[in-house]
Amino acid sequence: MALFERERLPARSTFSRFLAALTSEPVDALRTLFLDDLLRCSRSNDSHEKQTGGLADRVGNGWVVFDVDGTREAARQRALPQTEDLPPAHRRLDEVCAPGYTGRKRGQVVRTRTVISQAHSFQWLGSFGNKGNGRYREELRRGLTVIRSYLEAYHLSPASALLRLDGQYGTGAVLADLADFAFVTRGKDYTVLDHPLVQARLHLPPDQFQQRPESQIVRSLYGCPQVPVGSEGVSCRVVVATHPASKKKSPVGVTRAGVVYELFFTKLPRASVHRF
């Protein structure tokens, strides 16, 4: 409360006006301050291994997993009266929201947020938001800077980091931004299915079958190593999951000739892919 020179929180309207007056510069400075404090306190409390955690694949390789998730929140807007005796209509959400993809959420405007977290310790490393569909590639690059700072603080090699990405990052253009990081992401560039290497693999028996306990769907998994993705030609391992289409349209993947195809892109070796 020292910021307001008082012992109690200000009224909500007062606090709202204060937040509305903030520019991006102090917000970025506060974000950096929070991250530095998180890393300093974590290192001073216990050993690095206990604080960071980790995941080992079937061949014994250790990974520190970071989740990069793009979320969006839709807002509904009611009609505003517009008559000659009223001033021009103004919506406060115009400064933070804009028309965009709402997915299955109801609303006229949307705000997109990118969240970076450490999967083992559940540490929140960063959050970046923008109006509308956002600037997810710019936010991803900022998130990678945060992850590098985390790795340097714990004296970890970037080769030990694994990024789990949301499906909106599953294009060749975005994967090219990941530099040397290992990653796993759902793909959305379904032109990869037409690549000769993928087509040849789909005509062979699957590597394995998968069925989740809460679903009756049995998926056939096909691993395709070293497939170029996108116009950038990013080489990565492509995993194709297929299952028969039902009468209801599948919410994910693409349906061709009665078969639903789902794509996953990764830079992990084959043994590690099967572990995750």
Image (cartoon, rainbow, N blue to C red):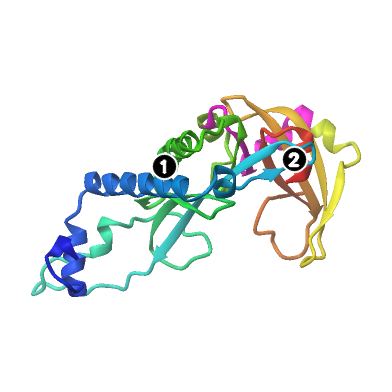
Question: What residue is shown with label 1?
Answer: 139
Q: Is residue 182 magenta?
A: yes
- Magenta range: 178-198
Measured as percent of width and height from the top left, residue 248 is found at 72, 65
**Residue carrying label 2:** 273
Where 114 sits versus 272, above or below? below
Q: Nearer the viewer, residue 80 or 272?
A: 272
Q: Residue at x 61, y 48 (%)?
A: 53
Q: Residue at the spot x=60%, y=30% of the render?
A: 159
Quadrant of the image occupied by residue 107: bottom left
Give the total number of marks visible in the rendering: 2
Q: Is residue 196 above or below residue 58?
A: above
Q: Label 1 neighbourhood size at 10 Å, few (<14), some (14-19), many (20+)?
A: many
The first of marks 1 and 2 along the sequence is 1
Give residue 74's quadrant in the image.
bottom left
Q: Nearer the viewer, residue 158 or 106?
A: 158
Residue 92 vs 43, above or below: the answer is below
Q: Residue 257: tell me if it is visible.
A: no
Please state if 196 lies on the left or on the right of 146 as rendered.
right
